[in-house]
Amino acid sequence: MRQHANKRILAPLAAVVAAGALAVTFAPAAPAAPQGFELCAVAGDSNPVGSVHVPIWGFGVPTTSGDCTTATASLPGPVLTVDEGDDVTITLRNALPAAPPPGPTPTTNHVVSFEIPGVSLDAGDVDAAVGGTATIKFHAGSPGTYLYESAGDAGRQEAMGLYGTLIVRSGTPGRAYDTAASAYDVQSTLVLSQVDPDFNAAPDTFDMNNYLATYWLINGKAYPETAPIAATGGQNVLLRYLNAGYDNTSMSLLGLHQTVLARDARVLDNPVVAATESIPAGATEDAIAVVPSTAPPSANGFALFNRNLHVTNGHGTGAGGMLTFIRP
């Protein structure tokens, strides 16, 4: 499994320039707003397409606080949305099944090890043993798109589905970041991942050298069950890409271009205009696509698809995979 880069510290800075004045006046920073979430890591079931069902481990929100039997694992996990400057607390409960006893085959301990690449977590315990709880705290200092995940069991937990999206909203409404170029009308979160049903059926003993994905997913679904993106001509569509998979994934638009504004929640000095953009494993990217007023190239709309041709379901039988449409 991949190793993530050192997490950078996010720090807010607010300044107001007095109109027509000769001097710059600094306004006091807005008070931080507390935001709290409760997540359970639980075993469950996922239905990527058709009648296919695979076991997963996923994050879910309990309907009764403290009771993970009321939480349902989802693939990906819930989208956590906060505002720039918020102080965030995540109460994490580990309700995964107990690890198997030691033996001649690979074993795991199922400790959930929570991390958000690009976010500096406060000092404290971010690991939750089976049946245990961890309290994760951080300051949402910079806007952007972040991937939260568990690095437990040498990456097997993420492969089973323990990942999700954290969105830190900009202090400027209608913008992904504090730049005019990031203004948008419609936004879509696109978590890219894959499933090898053989691994999911035996995550504790499966030889990862034999891992072979056969279902390629956008937000836990393969085409034709992926959700389309609704947008009309002239609108700016913000595409929030998160690659929760193991390979570098190239996403291509048919009939229009996308302008990449940020990578790993860092605004680019020089935005990149591309028809196809590669998102490295574990990375996030934010791009703007402007929907043209002309007719799309197909009745379904403007295709957004995996340029690596991971557009099949199962063992190469039937079209599907990482494919959706921006649909006027």
Image (spheres, helix red, strand yellow):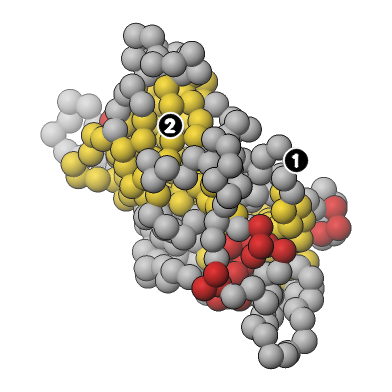
Query: What amino acid is at disc 1?
Result: Ser
User: Residue 108, position in %: x, y?
Assistant: 67, 80
Q: Residue at x 33, y 47 (%)?
A: 278
Q: Quadrant of residue 14?
A: top left
Residue 290 tag number: none
Q: Is residue 156 left or right of 142 when viewed as pictured?
A: right
| Residue tagged 2 | 304
In this rendering, the count of numbered labels is 2
Label 2, label 1: how far apart the Cα atoms are: 24 Å
- Is residue 204 among what the camera can see? yes
Nearer-the-camera pick, 232 or 134: 232
Q: Quadrant of residue 127?
A: bottom right
Q: In what element is the residue under mark 1? A: loop
Give the label, 2 or 1, closer to the camera: 1
| Residue tagged 1 | 51
User: Residue 16, position in %: x, y?
Assistant: 29, 37
Query: What amino acid is at disc 2?
Result: Leu
Please tell me whether residue 131 is drawn above or below residue 188 in the rendered image. below
User: Residue 91, position in %: x, y?
Assistant: 68, 62
Mark 1 is surrounded, within 10 Å at the Cα level, by few (under 14), some (14 to 19) or many (20 or more) other residues, namely few
User: Residue 104, position in %: x, y?
Assistant: 69, 90
Please tell me whether residue 278 is drawn above or below residue 159 in the rendered image. above
Nearer-the-camera pick, 215 or 161: 215
Q: Residue at x 75, y 40 (%)?
A: 51
Q: Residue at x 76, y 61 (%)?
A: 43
Q: Quadrant of residue 255?
A: top left
Mark 2 is surrounded, within 10 Å at the Cα level, by few (under 14), some (14 to 19) or many (20 or more) other residues, namely many
